[in-house]
Image: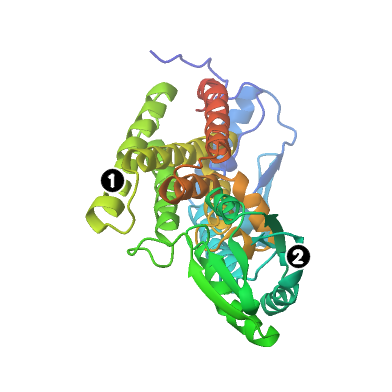
């Protein structure tokens, strides 16, 4: 049952005059000011307000004129500030902001991938030389010509035996092995599996360097890629799919099931990550057969990648709300994937990207998957630790802040 007002109150606790501006919403675009005249008392104010509204309704007296001792002045609505204020309260304002953000993201997307991948340049390629100090001195002229042709330097590691050099390739410490031979010949062993782009650059440059120095160069691939993946891009595409679908799934859960509690939400994220990782591995390994995957191992890496990507979005979502897509996209797609080493190996990336990429989820996932597929006997803990750290950080922020935000007024 609604409460009845006291006679003469006029619906105002303060008893001040109320004129036509009281029944306009905040989006009307103009602002008015009223100054009361000689009248006093709440009842008289209410009656004068009623008379003023009545006369305005019959067209006898326009708004903004003096009415029974009170004068209302309304500011004009056609100024730039007034129009901007109106615009910001319409649906067109957020739509315009989103259009500008999307346009900027398109340019950044093209720019980041072009900067990282369009013109890969060698930077400090780790290489091995098999032999003693005299052998290294004997191939110095060839190494100098090779570095000049690459426009970069080789980071030389010397190993006494070829078995030791091969082990360094297996551990992905070096990308090539130089073996001095009799009669001024040099054998260059490459590792396409360690980095297809690096192997391609070395294979193109080494014969030219040999001709300049009078050295006969023989090139062979110590660790070739699979026949279904001659460019070595399959792992990159697998990781890209897991990264993007991982946080898109979290976005869809937030939009379509906003009332889902934190623990069920995490369980549903884990469920679609597990299923999604299985489908990606089955598509690439079984249906297409591009790469011979260690299926369970690859499946679990993809699952962890999707879960980590989702946790990154949930972390940003609890921190900045509706704009969480922007930092997620920047971290995972614009920065993470070009610097991952999946499409262009780290020695060919700009030095900053090559360094940062190893510590981001896409780069860690590519590294883990690459080692699992091509170097199964030489696993490294670092990529798994990086993925786990991002997943746990996102999970901790989400659990810490989400419940507090749900309890906040207006949520």
Colour logic: rainbow
Q: Residue at x 52, y 73 (%)?
A: 219
Would residue 174 be visible to someone looking at this image?
yes
Helix, strand or loop at mark 1: helix
User: What mark, if any, has residue 279 been given in the picture?
Assistant: 1
Q: Which residue is more in the foreground, 79 or 44?
A: 79
Crowd around label 2: few <14 · some 14–19 · many ≥20 (10 Å):
few
**Can the viewer see residue 28?**
no
Q: Using the image, determine if residue 8 lies above or below residue 284.
A: above
How far apart marks 2 and 1 lie (CA) works out to 54 Å
Tell me the mark number nearer the camera, choosing from 2 and 1. 2
CB contact under 8 Å: marks 2 and 1: no
Quadrant in the picture for residue 226? bottom left
Q: Position of residue 253 (x, y in %)?
A: 38, 37
| Residue name at image x 54 percent, y 66 percent | 189
User: Within the image, what quadrant is residue 36 found in?
Assistant: top right
Q: Residues within 10 Å of mark 1 (few under 14, many from 20)?
A: some
Farthest-out residue, front: 182
- Apparent side of residue 236 relative to residue 172 in the rendered image (left or right): left
Q: Nearer the viewer, residue 243 or 9?
A: 243
Q: Quadrant of the N terminus?
A: top left
Q: Residue furthest left?
A: 287
Which residue is at 59% across, 42% downward? 21
Q: Nearer the viewer, residue 226 or 221?
A: 221
Q: Give the residue number, with chain letter if any, for mark 2.
A: 134
Residue 88: x percent and y percent? 58, 52
Q: Position of residue 255 (x, y in %)?
A: 39, 39
Q: Secondary structure at mark 2?
A: helix
Eyeballing the image, is 266 above or below 152? Answer: above
Q: Earlier in the sequence, mark 2 or mark 1?
A: 2
Foreground pick, 160 / 98: 160
């Amino acid at each position: 049952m609604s409460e009845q007002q006291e006679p003469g109150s006029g619906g105002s606790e303060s008893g001040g005059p109320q004129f036509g501006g009281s029944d306009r919403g905040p989006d009307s675009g103009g602002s008015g000011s009223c100054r009361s005249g000689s009248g006093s008392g709440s009842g008289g104010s209410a009656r004068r307000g009623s008379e003023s509204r009545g006369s305005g309704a019959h067209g006898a007296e326009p708004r903004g004129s003096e009415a029974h001792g009170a004068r209302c002045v309304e500011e004009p609505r056609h100024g730039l500030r007034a129009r901007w204020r109106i615009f910001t309260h319409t649906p067109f304002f957020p739509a315009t902001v989103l259009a500008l953000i999307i346009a900027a993201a398109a340019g950044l997307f093209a720019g980041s991938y072009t900067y990282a991948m369009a013109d890969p340049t060698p930077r400090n390629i780790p290489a091995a030389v098999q032999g003693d100090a005299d052998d290294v001195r004997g191939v110095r002229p060839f190494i100098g010509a090779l570095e000049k042709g690459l426009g970069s330097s080789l980071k030389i590691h010397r190993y006494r035996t070829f078995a030791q050099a091969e082990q360094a390739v297996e551990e992905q410490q070096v990308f090539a092995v130089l073996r001095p031979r009799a009669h001024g010949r040099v054998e260059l062993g490459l590792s396409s599996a360690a980095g297809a782009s690096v192997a391609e650059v070395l294979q193109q440059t080494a014969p030219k360097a040999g001709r300049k120095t009078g050295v006969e160069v023989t090139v062979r691939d110590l660790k070739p890629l699979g026949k279904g993946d001659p460019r070595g891009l399959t792992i990159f595409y697998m990781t890209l799919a897991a990264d993007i679908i991982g946080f898109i799934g979290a976005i869809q859960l937030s939009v379509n099931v906003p009332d889902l509690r934190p623990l069920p939400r995490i369980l549903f994220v884990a469920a679609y990550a597990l299923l999604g990782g299985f489908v990606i591995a089955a598509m690439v390994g079984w249906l297409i057969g591009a790469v011979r995957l260690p299926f369970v191992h690859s499946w679990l890496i993809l699952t962890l990648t999707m879960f980590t990507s989702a946790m990154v979005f949930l972390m940003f979502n609890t921190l900045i709300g509706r704009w969480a897509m922007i930092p997620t996209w920047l971290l995972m797609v614009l920065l993470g994937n070009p610097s991952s080493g999946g499409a262009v190996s780290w020695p060919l990336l700009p030095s900053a990207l090559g360094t940062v990429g190893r510590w981001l989820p896409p780069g860690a996932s590519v590294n883990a998957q690459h080692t699992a597929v091509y170097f199964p006997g030489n696993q490294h803990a670092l990529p798994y630790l990086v993925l786990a750290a991002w997943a746990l950080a996102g999970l901790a922020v989400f659990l810490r802040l989400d419940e507090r935000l749900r309890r906040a007024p207006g949520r």
